[in-house]
Image (tube, coloured by chain):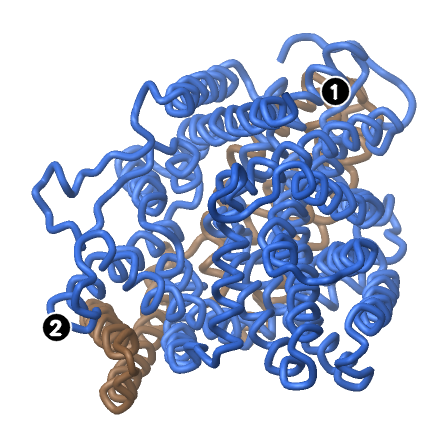
Chain colours: A blue, B brown
Amino acid sequence: MPPVEIKTGPYREITWEAITLGLIVGVILNMAITYAGLLIGFTIVGSEIAAIVGWGVLRGIMRRSTIVENNINQTIASAVNSTGAGIILTIPVLYLRGAEFEFLHVILATMCGATLGVAFIIPLRKQMIDIDRLRFPSGTAVAAILRSPGAGIKKAVLLTVGIAFSALVSVMVHLGWIAEYVDLGAMLGMPAHVENVWAVSLLSFGAGFISGWAGLAVLLGGILAYWIITPVAFGLGWIPQGIVGVDASAWAHAEMNRPLGIGMLIGGALMGIALALPSIREAFSSLRRIGGANKSGPSEELPLKLLYIAAIASVVLLVVTGFIAASPVGLPRIIVIALAGTLWIWLAGIIVAQCTGMTDWSPVSGMALIAVTIILFFSYSTNHESGVLLAVLIGATVCVAVTEGADMMQDLKTGTLVGALPARQQAVQLMFSWMGPIITVLVIHVIWNAYGFGAGTKIPAPQAQALDAAISGVVGGDVPLGKYAAGALIGGVLSASTFTGLGVMVGLSMYLPLVYLLPFGLGSVMNVVSGKLRGRRWVENTGVPLAAGLIVGDAVVGVVFAMISVLGGIG
Amino acid sequence: MAMFSYILLTLSTVAACLFAARIPVMTAPLAASVLVMAVAVLLMRRGYKARLAREMASESGRGIFDFAASARGVLQTLERLESDEQAGCGQIHRELDRLVDGALFDFAEAREGLLALHGFGGFARVVGEFSRGERAVNRGWSAAVDGYPCEARASVARAREIFAGLVDELERLRRQSSR
């Protein structure tokens, strides 16, 4: 380590500089990611960008920043920008359906979601990060950036090489200089319904590498879904006649594998919770022991009482907002709906946090679909228009909650690796996460008024179109309940095995598109093989910094291109 | 036995997913496949417990990582570092770096063995406290890199306190399981 200037005074952690920079970066990223999400259909969380900008501004220009201060900056930035993913999936549906709604109701409901998501997930930090020690690949990558000044030359070089190489490849993909996908199946002469297309995504590869064994389970689930179930279904004539080639694979994914995967996620998570009850109980009693006053230093965790108050206040506000927005549904029913939604937020939050913890993938659209289905079940019969409005509103609340919860966990993982105090990260996330929905909803409204969105427009909003179609299906009675139930049963049994979270992992892979699963799985295979050949220490000290660089480079370029598309849109 | 249970679980899972994927779901074959899955899971769990028990019973417990000795080693390093008033940021950083890459890494990698030794509750208590101590070490490391010697020493002291408690807990669990 090069000699450092010795500083006196308290260790800088929550500072005005970190808060201001985090908010500025968070707002800019939120706008860029919302626009890009409506355009291309998926979003990126910008923690990596925030950490790098933090380096430049806090450490480079102001010259007095600390590692944990930059961690607070990235925590705030990602708290503000991560809500976009949940909102662009749901709220545009209201515009697409021509629903009459008040802007304020949407903002209030999604703000409640942000607070609920954070309040519900914080008590699980001890379990998921300290006891299960889940990897959270993006959180690990951000920690690699933050720790780079003291991590030694070798790790810094590996991180930089990873970032540079990944950014270069990503730029070439974005500019169309190299293909976005490689159709290996066509090259090998495989039938078109047996999908074997690889995304050129070093982010997926890097995340797979950091995931290790858990990623391998995801790859095996993908093989089961796309290379066993789909061809067998095609061969046995389970896919309607006339649907052939890649359409057959897409049909099998939409009608068979995806609903089965959603069921497996739910069943797997429930079984995981049941089996982990002794250790969850231990984690909670540990939280109570250390939560309040820590004798030897500052508080480590936010008091549970504060979280309960935040959660109860959010639920009450959600009920009030729901009642005002969709009064024909009736107050008693709205109370039941809000409570069902809240319960679902808790379970979906665990599912999504577990998925991101093990793999970095977040099945948020599946969680939204289940939320909408549950709410429509309770509300649609009373008043169709209000029922759909309420379902989308609560669906958005759920989505925002689970994305905020998953982001909180990624940030807390980063914090653990750099030695941040969880209570401080939790406090800033709780204080600023509600701002994200306001910005996202405003951006969506501006884009709608400027260009409109949906099929045939400049802004296709593909995720919202998919949810809109799903809502029409639910309203028409087309809910694959059998698939959900069967999936839950299979996922539950798999999660009871000796591989922790196996049901959730396999469910996730049946739900996700194969194009990203393949490079992800390759990364996992590389981790396991290099661990066998070179040892686990080599994987941690050489492989992980390089993989972290791959994640960071790709994510940074993705966000930069999203910003360019925003500027292009404004132009 | 272990291999048989893996193969059985794989095959029954494939079958169950196929029967579940069909529209409509093939209920009876699905139920039969899930039953076979459950049997395979039971065999796996039994085989897993037996493997851990074998490792524990192996000559002088060679197969099992000595968690108490490892935690004591970490505690000694932290005590030495805390008592060395001359230690500057550079030295604290070097010592903690070695600790993170050495003893803490080994403890974390071997943690699965705690499940066999002390069950879910003991595992959660030990790993939870270990991670807490590790976080304090990481904070000391960050503060040393940033040039804050007071915070670095305070974090070392906090980590020492947590690891002292962890050593006591491991000793208590060892006494409990030998009874």
- Which residue matches tag 2? A236
Q: Is residue A93 left or right of residue A117?
A: left
Which residue in the protein does label 1 denote? B146
What chain letter is assigned to the residue under label 1?
B
Q: Which residue lies at the image location 24% right of the left edge and 34% below the top edge?
A: A182
Q: Taking A54 as reference, is A15 left or right?
A: right
Amino acid residing under circle 2: Leu
- Residue B67: give x, y in percent of width and height: 53, 53
A492 or A554, which is in the foreground? A554
Nearest the eye: B96 or A194: A194
Tell me the element at label 1: helix
Q: Quadrant of the N terminus of chain A?
A: top right
Say above or below: A399 vs A69: below
Number of disc labels? 2
- Image-based side of A195 in relation to A91, left or right: left
Name the side, left or right, on which A381 lies relative to A324: left
Mark toward the viewer: 1 or 2: 2
Q: Residue at x 22, y 66 (%)?
A: A229
Q: Quadrant of residue A175?
A: top left
Instruction: For mark 2, name the chain.
Output: A
- Taking A482 as reference, is A59 above or below it? above
Which residue occupies the foreground of this view, B37 or A109?
A: A109
| Up-down relation of residue A274 to residue A346 (above or below) | below
Q: Position of residue A549 (x, y in %)?
A: 48, 26
Give me the residue at 63% from left, 80% from top: A380
